Image (spheres, grey):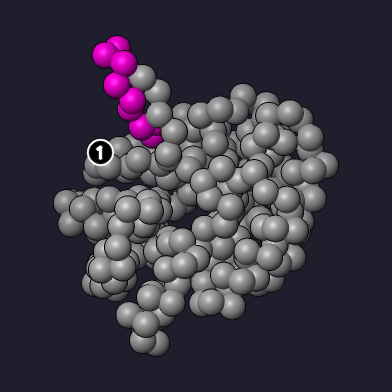
Amino acid sequence: MTAKELGRIMGGRILESYYDYAHVSNLVYEALDLGFECIQVFPNMLPKVKEVLNGRGLEVCAVVSYPHGIFLPEQKAFEIKDAIEAGATQIEFVVHNINVRSGNWELVRDEFRACRQAAGSHVLKAILECEWLTDEMIRKVCGIAAEEKIDRVCTSIGVYTRPDENKNDMLIGVEPEDVRKVKAAVQGKVKVVAQGNIDSVSKCRELLDAGADYISSEFAADILRSWE
């Protein structure tokens, strides 16, 4: 795979609150220069993205109910419609993982259905938190995603931490096994997005080898520039 080919399945992202709008502008310029498939931003960043793009083509994904997903379906649907009206061409929502972990599958289905209806024909992605889910939970929620016509399932939000041996907080990243589990669960009916602290070329290669259809990373530009 060439860097140009990788760019077509790569998403760059700014999903931290400490960045300013100059960083948002820079993300857009990097995406255009390097040929990203999309960028992911908070809804409040959409006007700046639209201004910088000035009509140039780039898929713009707005995150909804990020990072924890603990909102009602009607709230998520409102956010989705509002983001699309503001210029989003793709939507990525965080799944209500308390419902997933509690086995409230009809509530999960209601949420997916409401989000799908609100998104219309726009690409719709559901973010799981694979690091907290059992294999059976992953299998079940991915099955519902396929039945409710979700376009892509993402492996992680990438904001949680675990203490290391020195009791320092370490970000939890997506692992190849997470991708393999989701890939098996969707049975080819939904595309798989690997995301969650993908910070190197070697990690990116591992996730692609595991079956990821797309990569989403805050280090997308660095990875593409280092790709050989």
**In the rendered view, does 218 fall on the left or right side of 111?**
left
Label 1 sits on what residue type? Ser
Pick out the residue farthest to the bottom. 55
Residue drawn at point x = 44 percent, y = 53 percent: 214
The x and y percentages for residue 113 are 76, 56
Q: Quadrant of the N terminus?
A: bottom left
Residue drawn at point x = 16 percent, y = 51 percent: 226
Q: Nearer the viewer, residue 192 or 111?
A: 111
Q: Nearer the viewer, residue 99 or 194?
A: 99
Q: Nearer the viewer, residue 62 or 125?
A: 62
**In the rendered view, does 148 fall on the left or right side of 163?**
right
The x and y percentages for residue 153 are 57, 48
Residue drawn at point x = 56 percent, y = 62 percent: 91
Pick out the residue farthest to the right. 106
Pick out the residue farthest to the top. 165
* Count of numbered circles in the view: 1
Q: Nearer the viewer, residue 21 or 114?
A: 21
The x and y percentages for residue 165 are 29, 12
Vertical side of 174 occupied by 11: above or below: below
Q: Main secondary structure of the magenta part?
A: loop
User: Is residue 163 at all visible to an observer of this figure?
Assistant: yes
- Residue beneath label 1, please? 202
User: Is residue 61 at all visible to an observer of this figure?
Assistant: no
Which element type, helix, strand or loop, lies under badge 1? helix
Mark 1 crowdedness (10 Å alpha carbons): few <14, some 14-19, many ≥20: few
59 magenta-colored:
no
Residue drawn at point x = 39 percent, y = 87 percent: 55
Q: Which residues are magenta?
A: 165-175
